[in-house]
Amino acid sequence: MQVPASFDYQRAQSVDEALELLRRHGEEARVVAGGHSLLPMMKLRLAGPELLVDINELHELDYIEVVGDELRVGALTRHRALLESELVGRHFPIVHDAEKVIADPPVRNRGTIGGSLCQADPSEDLSAVCGALHARTVIRGAAGERIVPMADFHRGPYETAVGVGEMLVEVRIPVRPGAGSAYEKVERKAGDWAVAAAGVALTLREGRIADAGVGLAAVGAGALELPAVQDLLDGREPSEALYEEAGRLASEHCSPVTDSRGSAEYKRHLAGELTRRALRRAVARAGAAVEREA
Amino acid sequence: MRITVNVNGEDHTREVEPRHLLVRFLRDDLDLTGTHWGCDTSNCGTCVVLMDGEPVKSCTVLAVMAAGHEIRTVEGLAGTAGGDQLDPVQQGFIEEHGLQCGFCTPGMMLTGRALLDRNPDPSEQEIREAISGQLCRCTGYLNIVRSIQWAAKKQAESAAAATAAPTAAPAATLAGGQS
């Protein structure tokens, strides 16, 4: 039987109370929401917090809404809510692509977007999705809120920009006209972590690609956004030749390692191929959005 | 910590360590051993129970996190229609041979119940997706899907019968497996 080492537990009744607990207990405190990454790590002694601050009662962090030209998602929003949100599917089909292949329904009933991003696992899907979408994170502490772009949110494997006494409270994604996006993932079995995955988001303006975002998962840290590929795509007309070149660049700008899920060589191949596939679908969806919005 | 968890409609108060898992609380503290304990890593899904009506893997929920919430286990399936009547999902597993070794069965039935509560007429694809987080090591998935389909059909028939004859006793409309 696997049981975590002993710890203290506090159920926060407000964001301020959670922040105060996190500040007081410093490095030894961890936020728990769904717990489906943290509790398994605690069972394996890969994490050993002295205090868990349960934020599941903070319903004020559970929302999906459009404010101005941004979609705002509260950190406690469950995977299931993202998957079932018509608003999310309409603006960001990439999120629904990814959510369909993140774990399984009971896990999606518990897991949250905030927990997914804060776990900072390079194989985690929503981080690559948020990277491709050029999302921004809102981090709250005693001194107020600060906004950190997704590209700067992960500081390395399992490390984030969230400091002691702070919490991720919201994710903001820009809503743009003529937008299309897609996520392509290869997994060994249904609900598994990715062998490799690619997310693409872009807009079409007068037939040319703009606002391109490309993010990869499970091919090493630092691939949540690939500026080299994005620069290649911006301003260009979509074509198979362009997708080919983008895929080649993506496979060069990642650092997969050989493990039980596949060889580094295979994952590099997947990074290129999945980028091409995601590009094709994102462009097709952007084209449909342009027509729908005309 | 002292916690109170509502399990199958009844409040249970116990003193537990924060690290105590919900699956152990149900099995060891409340003797509700119908909830099975499998991989302990939230992969296999045999420990699925309903938390506020939705399936969760109880090996990856702390008992303290369930405090103040409603938990439903397989022991709470029968009897909701009155008496000791089986839930239509349980009857479906009998009619369609939805179990072989039975290890995954409690979780599968609870997921079936939660699905039908939200969606009384699910497609085969929707049923397959709903149970996709739970492993049947006998690989008896086809019969599990058929069992849940049987329950959906039975419920629809019972509802139609109740509308046609509002004076009929509810217990009679759910009796047996004579569809």
Image: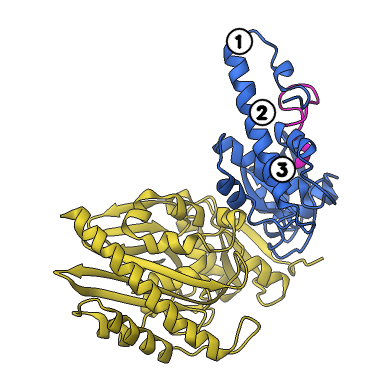
Marks 3 and 2 sit apart, C-alpha to C-alpha, by 15 Å
Residue A177 at x, y = what percent? 21, 61
Residue B85, magenta (yes or no): yes
Residue appearing at x 73%, y 46% in the figure: B143
Task: Report the amino acid beneath label 3.
Answer: Met
Across and down, in percent, residue A264 comes to 55, 90
Disc count in the image?
3
- Seen from the viewer's position, the closer of residues A64 and B15 is A64
Apparent side of residue A218 relative to residue A135 in the rendered image (left or right)? right
Left or right: residue A260 versus residue A132 is right
- Can see residue B71? no
Quadrant of image for the C terminus of chain B:
top right
In the foreground, A81 or A190: A190
Is residue A31 placed above or below A128 in the rendered structure?
Answer: above
Q: Which residue is mark 1?
A: B166
Local SS, label 1: loop
- Say whether disc 3 or disc 1 marks the residue closer to the N-terminus: 3
